[in-house]
Image (cartoon, helix red, strand yellow):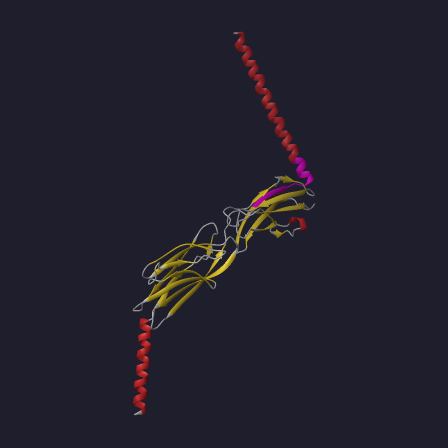
Amino acid sequence: MDKIAEKINMKIISLITLCALTSAHEITQLQVPLYADPRRPALLSCHFRMDDQKLHSVKFYREMNEIFRYNPSQKPPIRLFNLTDIMVQDGECTADSCMVKVMPPPVATMAVYTCEVSTEGPKFQIARQTKHMNVVAMPQSDPVISGAPKVLKPGEPIFLNCSSDYSLPPSNINWYIDDELQKPDVWQRTELSPMQPGGLQKSWRVLRVRIPQTVSGALRVRCEAIVKSEPPVVKDTTSIITVHSRTQLSKYVSNSRGVKLATNAIFLVTVLWTFNEISRFMSL
């Protein structure tokens, strides 16, 4: 009898478990943008399946703070909760989803967003899903190098500047000469512009070096702007400077003078020929 009762109890437990599984609700998809631009609102959406359960509420949290609540049995059914560093602009729900529009804070940060879906009694079941969102604004263009001469001779100094586009966080700038990282002096650190709407800033850094006496040929100078996000975003630009030895530079100057003299001679011949033709025409 004990064995029969035990088997009956096991069947009852299995049946209850099966019923609970088949009637359980779940969150089928939580959409949170991995990167959010502080100049534009971010859209969060939570999709859920209720089966035979009755929906009690849908809530969104940023970290531990509630920012949105949907309760179909209350009037009004939707409530928005603004925080000191985030503004909830709008929200709407259907029978199986809720969408929330939030304005990210103008600070480079990562936050956790959670969707919570709960059922009415007597079960009062709760389903949750969580995702991360990074507040970051990518630079729209490559950095710009200014002050780069086309031709140098060994031993001459170069003084360059590299400017990055607006971003959040601001770009950190590195200089490379022929793929060799240039260690900055104290006064050559990355400088930042005043903040723009959304917390964006430009950055720039100068490079001042002297060309070694042994260097000649093409010198490849590269500026690299790095936005420290996950993963990092890297934009760069390159400038080619020709380094001539003193002999090469003399030839270069001589050739330039020769070309200039030839050009002047051609111009003079042309003027004389034109003057001669005009004289002949006037004598007719």
Q: Looking at this view, name the residue that lies furthest to the front.
A: 75
Image position, residue 267 (x, y; %): 58, 22
Residue 185 shows in the view: no
Residue 23: image quadrant is: bottom left
Magenta span of residues = 238-251
Count of numbered marks: 0
Q: Looking at this view, name the residue that lies furthest to the top.
A: 284
Q: Decide which of 3, 265 is in the foreground and name it.
A: 3
Q: Is residue 284 left or right of residue 120?
A: right
Looking at the image, residue 201 lies above or below residue 8: above
Q: Decide which of 99, 145 is in the foreground and name it.
A: 99
Q: Is residue 275 left or right of residue 49?
A: right
Residue at left 61%, top 44%?
Answer: 161
Q: Is residue 212 highlighted in magenta?
A: no
Residue at left 66%, top 32%?
Answer: 254
Q: Is residue 68 left or right of residue 208?
A: left
Residue 76: image quadrant is: bottom left
